[in-house]
């Protein structure tokens, strides 16, 4: 009564669509966001590597080495976010440092966490977008 062929299976089930490339406008937008985050956090990280900033960390009750550690992570993350192959990793590292900055600013320094929140949003969005653009992670 019914005849089942290999063609019947292909016609019945939808085929997978090939992965699409990101739109050029979005790609440009995220490159600009990456560049902005890299320049901003490279400047902040480099300032944490100075002796004067280490003294500021010490006056807040933190060890001097924490300033150097945070500065080094921010400088390395800023370099990683610019390199296309490591942009997702760099954005994730910088987003994690911004989580620490959001907690640090209002609790210990007494300043607004809004700049750190903005940078968390930017670096988090870049990490998300780059994971979509390159799902294999390489």
Image: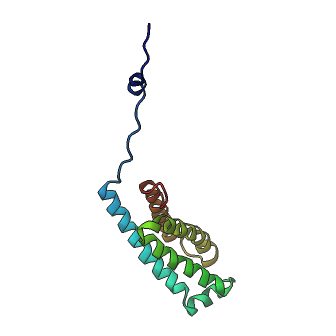
Frontmost residue, 114 versus 68 = 68
Return the x and y of residue 131 as percentages of the image width and height.
47, 57
Return the x and y of residue 61 as percentages of the image width and height.
69, 83
Query: Residue 35 occupies which quadrant of the picture?
Result: bottom left
Frontmost residue, 58 versus 123 = 123
Residue at the image point whose x is 61% and y is 69% from the top:
103
Residue at the image point whose x is 38% and y is 63% from the top:
30
Q: Is residue 138 above or below residue 38?
A: above
How many marks overall? Answer: 0
Left or right of 97 on screen, residue 118: left
Return the x and y of residue 33 as percentages of the image width and height.
39, 67
Colour setting = rainbow
Query: Residue 104 occupies which quadrant of the picture?
Result: bottom right
Frontmost residue, 106 versus 30 = 30
Residue that lies at the very extreme toward the bottom in this rendered image: 51
Q: Is residue 126 above or below residue 81?
A: above
Residue at the image point whose x is 42% and y is 72% from the top:
82
Return the x and y of residue 17 as percentages of the image width and height.
38, 40
Frontmost residue, 43 versus 102 = 43
Residue that lies at the very extreme toward the left in this rendered image: 24
Left or right of 15 on screen, residue 46: right
Quadrant location, the N terminus = top left
Residue at the image point whose x is 38% and y is 25% from the top:
11
């Amino acid at each position: 009564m019914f005849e089942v062929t290999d063609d019947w299976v292909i016609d019945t089930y939808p085929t997978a669509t090939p992965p699409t490339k990101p739109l050029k406008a979005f790609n440009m937008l995220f490159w600009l966001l990456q560049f902005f985050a890299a320049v901003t956090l490279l400047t902040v990280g480099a300032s944490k590597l100075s002796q004067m900033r280490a003294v500021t960390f010490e006056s807040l009750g933190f060890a001097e080495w924490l300033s150097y550690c945070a500065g080094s992570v921010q400088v390395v993350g800023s370099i990683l976010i610019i390199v296309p192959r490591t942009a997702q990793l760099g954005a994730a590292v910088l987003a994690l440092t911004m989580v620490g900055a959001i907690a640090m600013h209002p609790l210990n320094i007494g300043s607004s966490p809004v700049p750190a929140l903005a940078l968390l949003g930017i670096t988090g969005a870049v990490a998300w977008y780059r994971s979509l653009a390159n799902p294999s992670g390489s």
